[in-house]
Image (cartoon, rainbow, N blue to C red):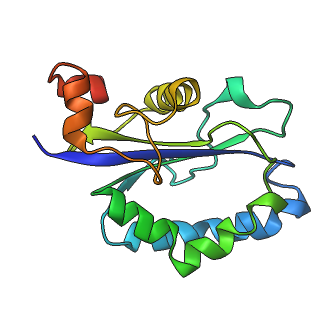
C-alpha cells in the first residue's frame, strides 16, 4: 500500500481576521497557498467549497481565550516534499512573522501522520493527532518534521491495519 503525508498546523489568532493588525497575514494567504499548490509533492489542502481555508471550523476546544484558531491541513507525497515547501523562501517569509499574528503557545501546534494514498484526512483526524502528539510526543501515529517516522512504522504500530491511520 502507498502512503501520503498529512499535516496540520494551527494558530491562535491575536485578533479577528478582519482586524487591521492581521492585514498582511490575510493579504498573504492566497499567494502562499498558491506556492503550496504548485510545490513539488503537494497533493491536497483543506478548504471550503469556495476555496476559503480560513472558514474551516476546527479546534474550538483549543482557543484558550484567543480571537480564534486557524487550521491549515494538507497532504504531501513525502516528509521531504513538505519540508522543502515549509523552508522555501516564500513560506519562510510569512513563517518568520507569525508572532505578529498568532499567540505564542507552549503546546505542539502542528502534527504529521501517514494516510493511505488517496484518502483525505478530516478535521477530527487532525484534532486527534494534535492531542496524541501533545500527550505522548512524537510517535509513528503523530510526529513532527524534526522527528518523523516511516509509514510502515505507523502501520506496524496498529498490527498492520492501514485504515486506523485515517478512518472512513
Q: How many numbered marks does the figure carry?
A: 0
The residue shown at (57%, 46%) is 9
Residue 168 appears in the figure: no
Q: Eyeballing the image, is 86 above or below 110? A: below
Residue 126 or 26: which is nearer the viewer? 126
Quadrant in which residue 77 is drawn: bottom left
Residue furthest top as drawn:
159
Q: Eyeballing the image, is 91 above or below 113? A: below
Q: Position of residue 67 (x, y in %)?
A: 84, 40
Q: Position of residue 117 (x, y in %)?
A: 20, 44
In the image, taking residue 63 as reference, residue 120 lies left or right, namely: left
Residue furthest bottom as drawn:
89
Q: Eyeballing the image, is 20 above or below 39? A: above
Residue furthest left as drawn:
1
Residue 109 or 117: which is nearer the viewer? 109
Q: Position of residue 126 (x, y in %)?
A: 48, 33
Quadrant in which residue 92 is drawn: bottom right
In the image, taking residue 6 as reference, residue 132 lies left or right, namely: right
The residue shown at (14%, 45%) is 2
The residue shown at (43%, 50%) is 74
Image quarter (top left, top right, bottom left or bottom right) of the C terminus: top left
Residue 49 or 127: which is nearer the viewer? 127
The residue shown at (84%, 37%) is 66
Q: Position of residue 36 (x, y in %)?
A: 45, 67
Residue 29 appears in the figure: yes
Image quarter (top left, top right, bottom left or bottom right) of the N terminus: top left
Amino acid at each position: 500500500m502507498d502512503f501520503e503525508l498529512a499535516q496540520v498546523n494551527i494558530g491562535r489568532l491575536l485578533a479577528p481576521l478582519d482586524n487591521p493588525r492581521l492585514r498582511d497575514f490575510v493579504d498573504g494567504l492566497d499567494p502562499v497557498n498558491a506556492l503550496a499548490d504548485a510545490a513539488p509533492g503537494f497533493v491536497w489542502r483543506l478548504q471550503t467549497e469556495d476555496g476559503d481555508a480560513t472558514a474551516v471550523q476546527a479546534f474550538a476546544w483549543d482557543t484558550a481565550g484567543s480571537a480564534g484558531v486557524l487550521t491549515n491541513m494538507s497532504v504531501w507525497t513525502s516528509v521531504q516534499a513538505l519540508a522543502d515547501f515549509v523552508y522555501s523562501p516564500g513560506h519562510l517569509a510569512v513563517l518568520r512573522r507569525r508572532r505578529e499574528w498568532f499567540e505564542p503557545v507552549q503546546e505542539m501546534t502542528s502534527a504529521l501522520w501517514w494516510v493511505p494514498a488517496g484518502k483525505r484526512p478530516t478535521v477530527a483526524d487532525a484534532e486527534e493527532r494534535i492531542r496524541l502528539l501533545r500527550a505522548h510526543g512524537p510517535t509513528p501515529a503523530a510526529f513532527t518534521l524534526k522527528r518523523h517516522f516511516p509509514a510502515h512504522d505507523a502501520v506496524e504500530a496498529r498490527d498492520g491495519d492501514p485504515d486506523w491511520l485515517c478512518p472512513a
